[in-house]
Amino acid sequence: MTENDAFDTGNPDEVAKRKALQIAGEAFGHCEEEGIDGIIAVGVFLDHIIAHLVSMNDKTVTAEFLETLANRVRDGIYDHAVGEVKGEGMNEESAP
């Protein structure tokens, strides 16, 4: 049983999000293994993601979405994810 399985609620969207997070983490880890600086990898990932968003929506919708993300960062909504990204897993405070 993986950590992701322990928090599997059966919700297809939640399962897909956890799988995507796992894949993204593996890709980031692979970049580190190849000696690619983390900030460069993050920049490239963001460029790819933003280009994908623009291809699915218009520029205004994408820009508004990204502005909401900036506000969420300022509000601390991603603070709980820092441990998950560092491989520390979820704790009681960050559990869904």
Image: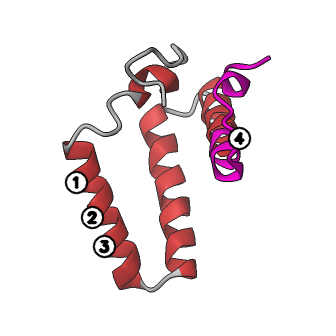
Q: Amino acid at mark 4?
A: Lys
Q: Which residue is mark 4?
A: 19
> Measuring 26% from the left and 54% from the top, which residue is drawn there?
70
Residue 40: x and y in percent read: 46, 42
Q: Main secondary structure of the magenta part?
A: helix
Distance (Cα) linking label 1 and label 4: 25 Å
Q: Which residue is mark 3?
A: 64
Residue 65: x and y in percent read: 36, 68
For residue 67, which numbered disc appears in the image?
A: 2
Front-lying residue, 36 or 51: 51
> Measuring 20% from the left and 43% from the top, which residue is drawn there?
75
Q: Is residue 2 magenta?
A: yes
Quick one: quadrant of the N terminus? top right
Distance (Cα) linking label 3 and label 4: 26 Å
Distance (Cα) linking label 1 and label 2: 6 Å
Q: Secondary structure at mark 4?
A: helix
Quadrant housing residue 8: top right
Q: Residues within 10 Å of mark 1 (few under 14, many from 20)?
A: few
Q: Secondary structure at mark 1?
A: helix
Q: Which residue is mark 1?
A: 71
Which of the marked residues, 1 or 4, is nearer the chain's N terminus? 4
**Residue found farthest to the right:** 1
Q: Secondary structure at mark 3?
A: helix
> Measuring 40% from the left and 26% from the top, which residue is drawn there?
82
* 52 relative to 96, above or below: below
Quadrant housing residue 21: top right
Which of the marked residues, 3 or 4, is nearer the chain's N terminus? 4
Magenta extent:
1-18
Distance (Cα) linking label 2 and label 4: 25 Å
Q: Amino acid at mark 3?
A: Glu
Q: Mark 1 near mark 2, Cβ–Cβ under 8 Å? A: yes
Distance (Cα) linking label 1 and label 3: 11 Å
